[in-house]
Amino acid sequence: MTTDFAPFLAWLDDQYEEMLAKTIALAETNSGSLNADGVNRVREMLTEYCQVLEGEIEVIPVAPYQNLNANGVMESFPLGDALRIRKRPEAPLQIFFCGHMDTVFAKDSSFQQVRWLDEETLNGPGVADLKGGIMVMLKALEALERSPWADKIGWQILFNPDEEIGSPGSAPLISEAAKQVHLGMIYEPCFPDCNFAGERKGSGNFCVMVRGKAAHAGREHHLGRNAVRAMCDFVSDLDDLNGLRPGVTINPGLIEGGGAVNIVPDLCIHRFNIRLVDPADEDWCLGQIDKLLAKINARDGISIELFGNFGRKPKVLSTANTKLFELARECGQSLGMDLQWLPTGGCCDGNNLAAAGIPNIDTLGVQGGKIHSSDEYLKVKSLNERAKLSALILFKLATSENLNWLEEN
Ligand SMILES: [Zn+2]
């Protein structure tokens, strides 16, 4: 390792206690995506934690989350505000830092506290996804600010309130950032073996609603138009699309409809998810679904309507993105870590940033696992290790003579 960097990385060794204490405080503050008050409490804590960075702080409200409920009514849920912090927008290299404040654990979940599984392993809501990662990001940036190379890098942090529900409200903020930066660093947890996520599938969440006509099942069955039956036909046809296109998978996930068995049901709702590898397959999927909808809509007394979209574009690795991974691997090597990047079917904000042409690494956060379950854990040693990794990436970028590769597609 270039000896110059060593003292600035060593400083991070002394930050462990603080990183751990703040990770625990954040994890024990519930911030389920739809708990706007809880997300805003986390935002206030982060505002305080960020003071030391001396950036320009903004609180930005985002649009409410819309969801079609089981009664066919579009419901609106307020979300917590996003938090954006910017510094040195005039510096030659601009970096976007992102981490989400929300978790999958609702306000009434029984999983609200941390506990130690052993000396190295902390179990708790969001300890890995993504509250530990937030501390990794903030300490790496603090290390940069304390170094002599800070003036080479301008940065903006976005703490978004809604990643776990697909970032519907914060997506415009990510697109806005993509126009202003050269690369992105996102703090989702790495894989349990410390490796990065490379390519990612794209994903779309959809909902279809069938309306038919209610009638008494005994006296006037012939007057009814059965929404459940129409939906069953739609779902079978939809599932039959699996296997027709390499890399495309469709998962019918939930059907809600009907009630008393002596009534012909007049409403049925179905929710499904599509994953794909090739961005061009979005159009293929939408075209196929349109045909299925037309078939159902042609029926007497039955109507079907589609909601939703492909919120996450596939993350395809550009040349620049691959070079960014190579830089991270080199940094890992000098810190004694052997890091690879592997494709995954999961998605995150890194998908959207890559789709906007910005190379990024989206799993710079902590080592942990079993995320989205009450077994979620954090390997606490990784708080330091990963902060050093990010700090070293920043130092190397700041001192690099040639960053032209960032423009390669
Ligand atoms: Zn996450």
Image: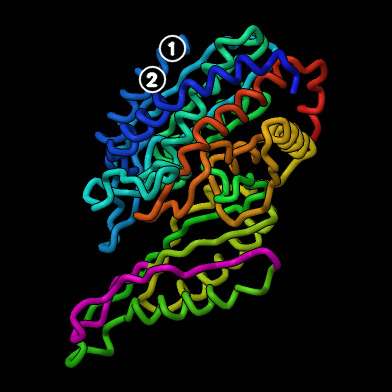
- The local crowd at label 1, few if under 14, some if 14 to 19, many if 20 or more residues have their Cα within 10 Å, is few
Give the magenta range. Answer: 246-269
Q: Residue at x 38, y 33 (%)?
A: 23
In the picture, the disc for residue 24 is none
Decide if ligand 1 comes within 8 Å of the CB at mark 1: no
Which amino acid type is marked by label 1? Val
| Tag 2 secondary structure | helix
Q: Position of residue 217 (x, y in %)?
A: 21, 88
Q: Nearer the viewer, residue 319 or 12?
A: 12
Report the quarter where the C terminus lies: top right
**Mark 2 — residue?**
49
In 3D space, how far apart are the residues under numbered discs 1 and 2 (Cα atoms)? 7 Å
**Mark 1 — residue?**
52
Q: What is the quadrant of residue 146 in the picture?
A: top right
Queried whether the magenta region covers residue 112, the answer comes back as no
Report the quarter where the N terminus lies: top right
